[in-house]
Image: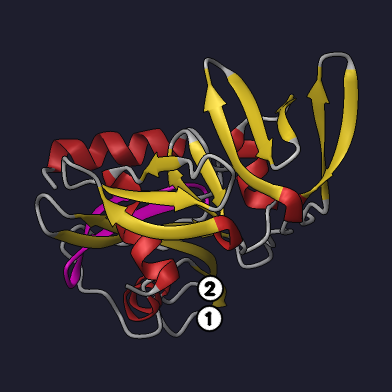
Amino acid sequence: MKSTVVSQFSAFIQDWVPEEASIAIAGGNQYISYIPGRHDIKISQGQPIPSGSITERVYMQKSKVESLVDKSVFGVPYYGVGYPIQDEDTGFTGALTVILPPEYTITAPKTLSFIAGRKDDIWVPLSVEQIIYIESHQKKTLIYTNDGCYSSKHPLKALEPRLSGSFMRIHRSYIVNISYIKEISRDVASNLEVTLKNEDNTKLVISQNYVQRVRNILGF
């Protein structure tokens, strides 16, 4: 990643986190960008990644990590939330960590059991187990089940964190129920796609931005 891209990426993320948060981006074995917030643990560009840090744990687990880190790592305790970053085109592997005060806690949103779906002027409580996939299309959220298609007032970004681990984002426009995936194959353009277990054997493309995440979740 070029430094200008990293700076823009950091600035974009900063708009979405609390003012007290600092943001650290690592690439390889060092930090390549750091934007201090009110809770500043004073990371320097080029500083090696220390043992026990959230960044190190993200590298080891290759997944999101959130935890309290004591002062033995940076001299200042913090609560960190780290995410892996990968770019298959450039081969870049790194991590982004949001650094918060140690007293900060993240309350996970309650997992949904039902989603209200609308068809014409009727609202139906849809059990999440019966949902095959959810699509964002022309600023509308569409929920597909074997009983038909319903609309929802909630965007994908609001639904995704409240769905169970049985659901997986494969594209900016699609969230699929893993239980309804029949197979994963390649289309004529060599893009990965899922075929679903529904009447139409619906095929949905896995976008390049989500390929590695899908591989990690399903283990292939």
> Which quadrant of the figure contains the C terminus?
bottom left
Tell me the SS state at disc 2. loop
Q: Amino acid at mark 1?
A: Asp
Where residue 149 appears, as percent x and y from the top left, is 69, 29
- Give left or right: position of 127 versus 12: right
Within-10-Å neighbours for mark 2: few <14, some 14–19, many 20+: some
Q: Amino acid at mark 2?
A: Pro
Start and end of the magenta stretch?
A: 22-38
- The residue shown at (90%, 21%) is 122
Residue 62 in which image quadrant: bottom left
- The residue shown at (18%, 41%) is 188
- The residue shown at (72%, 58%) is 108
Residue at the disc numbered 1 = 70
Residue at the disc numbered 2 = 77
- The residue shown at (44%, 38%) is 14
Q: Is residue 30 above or below residue 2?
A: below
- Give left or right: position of 74 versus 120: left
